[in-house]
Image (cartoon, rainbow, N blue to C red):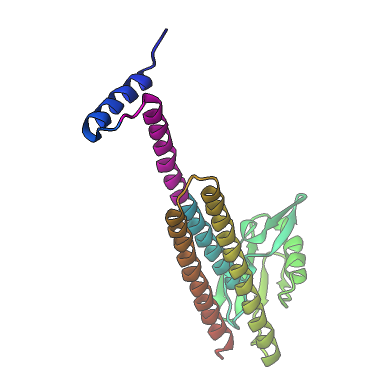
């Protein structure tokens, strides 16, 4: 009969424990203890990966928030205003900033110069139908957009957009928190984590959540100030 190296190691370990403690520990018991310890260590590492993943996803949400806030008009020309505008290009919807050079000749004007002149009309239509309130001037070569000063009513609408975008980001962050907490609780229920370890992991996720929600509020407040500044 072949004897596994694991069983031999377990036998040696049991002999040491027996000689030190005076209690007899079978090789099978020692083997079970060793098997239980290894998964627990790995489970802690898995929990740490969960908390790290939550943090990274929350960071990504903040990046998306910044991109979305950049598209909101502030009364001054900014090439990022057109970041979310897409035009039909040979049957595929394509961001117009990949189809043209968008420059800012002055604080009140944008200029769009298509790489492919045949796409000029499609880009013009895309800007008009994007709901940004822009009416491009087409001279046959480039598009020019004059940025009007914001009216009081328009400012109020944009402030609502800022809050809405901020709330969407907060919902996304809280959903990430829920996913992470649920994963840790499942590990605890399965016996892969101790109660204290699970609580530590949940606490780390909550701290990350609070930090990112605060950053959302700060980013939205900054954009609101830009919108309301004449």
Magenta part mainly helix, strand or loop?
helix
Count of numbered tags:
0
Quadrant of the image occupied by residue 1: top left
Q: Nearer the viewer, residue 21 or 106?
A: 21
Q: Nearer the viewer, residue 107 or 38?
A: 38
Whether residue 26 appears in magenta in the rendering, the answer is: yes
Q: Horizontally, is 86 left or right of 3 in the view?
A: right
- Residue 162, compared with residue 50, is above or below; it is below
Q: Residue at x 64, y 81 (%)?
A: 147
Question: Which quadrant: the C terminus?
Answer: bottom right
Whether residue 30 appears in magenta in the rendering, the answer is: yes
Q: Residue at x 58, y 72 (%)?
A: 69
Q: Nearer the viewer, residue 23 or 13?
A: 23
Q: Horizontally, is 221 left or right of 131 in the view?
A: left
Q: Position of residue 72 (x, y in %)?
A: 62, 76
Q: Position of residue 11 (x, y in %)?
A: 32, 22
Q: Residue at x 72, y 63 (%)?
A: 123
Q: Position of residue 135 (x, y in %)?
A: 74, 76
Magenta-drawn segment: 24-49
- Residue 78, compared with residue 17, is above or below; it is below
Q: Nearer the viewer, residue 225 or 9?
A: 9
Residue reaching furthest to the left: 20
Q: Residue at x 38, y 13 (%)?
A: 3
Residue reaching furthest to the top: 1
Q: Position of residue 105 (x, y in %)?
A: 56, 75
């Amino acid at each position: 009969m072949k004897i596994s190296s694991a069983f031999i190691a377990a036998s040696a370990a049991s002999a040491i424990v027996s000689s030190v403690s005076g209690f007899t520990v079978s090789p099978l018991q020692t083997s079970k203890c060793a098997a239980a310890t290894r998964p627990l260590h790995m489970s802690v590492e898995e929990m740490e990966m969960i908390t790290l993943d939550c943090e990274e996803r929350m960071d990504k949400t903040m990046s998306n928030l910044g991109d979305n806030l950049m598209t909101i008009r502030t009364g001054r020309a900014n090439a990022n205003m057109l970041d979310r505008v897409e035009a039909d290009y040979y049957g595929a919807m394509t961001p117009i900033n990949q189809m043209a050079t968008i420059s800012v000749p002055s604080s009140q004007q944008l200029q769009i110069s298509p790489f492919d002149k045949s796409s000029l009309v499609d880009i013009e239509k895309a800007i008009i139908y994007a709901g940004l309130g822009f009416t491009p001037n087409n001279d046959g070569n480039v598009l020019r957009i004059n940025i009007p000063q914001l009216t009081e009513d328009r400012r109020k609408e944009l402030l609502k957009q800022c809050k809405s975008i901020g709330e969407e980001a907060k919902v996304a962050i809280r959903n990430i928190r829920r996913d992470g907490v649920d994963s840790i609780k499942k590990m605890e229920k399965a016996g892969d984590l101790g109660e204290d370890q699970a609580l530590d992991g949940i606490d780390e996720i909550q701290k990350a959540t609070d930090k990112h929600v605060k950053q959302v509020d700060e980013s939205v407040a900054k954009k609101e100030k830009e919108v309301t500044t004449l």
